[in-house]
Amino acid sequence: MKISNLLIVGTICLLCACGSRKGYQEGGHATEMYKAEESAQYAPPPPPPPPPTADQITKLAEPLAAQDGKKDRKKEIADSVQQNTELYTKIVENQFITPQVNPLSTFSIDVDKASYTNCRQMINNGSLPQPDAVRIEEFVNYFDYSYPNPTGEHPFSITTEVATCPWNSKHQLVHIGLQGKKLDYSQLAPSNLVFLIDASGSMADVNKLPLLKSSLKLLLNELSAKDKIAIVAYAGAAGLVLDATPATEKDKILDALDKLEAGGSTAGGEGILLAYKIAKQNFIANGNNRIILATDGDFNVGVSSPAELTRVVEEKRKEGVFLTVCGFGMGNYKDYTMEELSRNGNGNYFYIDQIAEAKKVFVKEMRATLFTIAKDVKLQVEFNPAKVQAYRLIGYENRMLKTEDFEDDKKDAGELGAGHTVTALYELIPVGVQSEFVKNAPKLKYQATEKTSKANTNELLTIKFRYKKPSEDVSKLMEESVVNSEVLTLPQSSENFRFAAAVAEFGLLLRQSEFKAQASYEQATELAKGAMGKDEEGYRNEFLRLVENCLLMAKGK
């Protein structure tokens, strides 16, 4: 492209971004004010503004094309600007909080993994991901950890560990792990699945609709005669491609899949409504009723705004139909929309960048994903101010809850599937450590902040869990304390701890986090190398390659 062309395209990009930048700055300013009150962890990130439409871009291109002196330049310039319209919401990192003012940290669990695979494809394509594409909790939870299976009345076990923080030796890192109960898949309830497939023009690329078809064929091989499959496709208008069909009728289902072709605009909202209608018509009481949405997220016809779509899936989840989202492709990928839909539809969010990932999602993990063993799982951690000067939850920014939400059984939270693991990390600043991250707690006029007798014990923190059984509406409570004498050195810590810490350190670097301290790609590599475990599927070795590639790219800047 000529220099003049680059200048023109750059000017349009700048004009198109002005509204977006203003929106982000305003949202960021509001969040900074909230942080000043040490309540930032309760504020959800503001949704990103929509990208400019084709008409808006073309209109902006007109005067610039006229200046260039070529009548046919308008379309060429607009097409250049539209080549990449990926959309991510701004993530405002959780800050360090002083327990004297806010001793409680409350959040919903998250087992989504899309952020890791999306960033992986960016790295494999030779570029570092933009910071807002990096959700550290999804990086950490991409990997399985060897937590003990539950043996008691509860459907999951709890594992805790505290050791020196790798990227800041004066700090401590708390590792919390949940292990979901594994089920006998031969005894599982039947499934009523509706594949909602985006067959719009934006899905024509080889890493979109063709990969999507191959992925769903893998899932089909995992289902049985008691499971039913329906297919809804949308492109300009939504339509029923295949009514509910026993999963054993593979030829009929595969024929319907093979006939799908990409073309037209994206009537995603209409498609979602039709998919829920089909799911309700074939509803299985006490079964698994779920829509599997496969798309690049580029909704632009009908009910298309994230807010409208979210209201639809929130309403439908109350009727017992859940939503799993699988993202495909790049260039016009709408991460924010899909993450919002899955989170509010009691589902999971994956990103499929290659057939190996499709196998991981649809063969290795989907059976567990489809069957919820605990819903509305919430964690609330209380920190002892006599031992903890400040704390920070790493990641989970869009899963933060208000303190009162923990006791509120009407408040929606994350789901745990059969055999799933969930991992969360807190970074602590012990009492007595000098730190730039610790702010003086304000003196209160109307109430005292006196410590109770429990503060004088050796307890570092107390973890509370609330969850509901899938068919119940009243939550159950679990509680566990962590004592200060159990703090380990890094070499003493488990493989689970060290590998999760290495992944978190990698995420801090990619996010260009203000809390990365002495983090480095070299240190993350060494930490992970010493905690590889069995790695039967090779996912941890692949992680090492990603870190090494990022190190090379960082050195090449």
Image (cartoon, grey):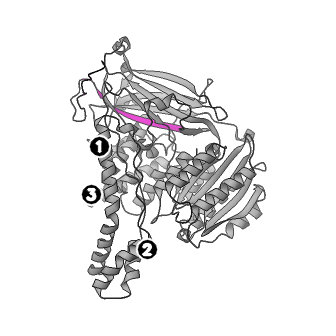
Classify mark 2: residues with Cα within 10 Å, few (<14), some (14-19) or many (20+).
Answer: few
Please name which of the two marks, 3 or 1, marks the residue nearer to the observer.
Answer: 1
Q: Which residue is mark 2?
A: 55
Q: Relative to 33, say whether 118 is above or below.
A: below
Are the residues tagged 1 and 2 within 8 Å (C-beta)?
A: no
On the picture, is 392 further left or further right than 345?
left
Dot 2 or dot 3, earlier in sequence: 2
Please name which of the two marks, 2 or 3, marks the residue nearer to the observer.
Answer: 2
Q: Name the element at disc 2.
A: helix
Q: Name the element at disc 3.
A: helix
Q: Which residues are magenta?
A: 421-446
Q: Amino acid at mark 2?
A: Asp
Tell me the quarter of the image containing the C terminus.
Answer: bottom left
Residue in the picture at 27% in, 76% down: 7
Where does residue 402 sit, x and y in percent of width and height? 43, 34
Q: Amino acid at mark 3?
A: Lys
Q: Which residue is mark 3?
A: 555
Where does residue 129 sit, x and y in percent of width and height? 37, 57
Residue in the picture at 34% in, 51% down: 510
Where does residue 327 sit, x and y in percent of width and height? 53, 57
- Return the mark for residue 32: 1
Tell me the quarter of the image containing the N terminus.
Answer: bottom left
Classify mark 1: residues with Cα within 10 Å, few (<14), some (14-19) or many (20+).
Answer: some
Residue 247 lies in quadrant: bottom right
Q: Relative to 269, say whether 154 is above or below.
A: above
Q: Nearer the viewer, residue 460 or 201?
A: 201
Q: Nearer the viewer, residue 156 or 39?
A: 39
Classify mark 3: residues with Cα within 10 Å, few (<14), some (14-19) or many (20+).
Answer: few
Where does residue 51 sit, x and y in percent of width and height? 41, 64
Rounded to the nearest whole Å, what is the CA distance between mark 2 and mark 3?
A: 41 Å
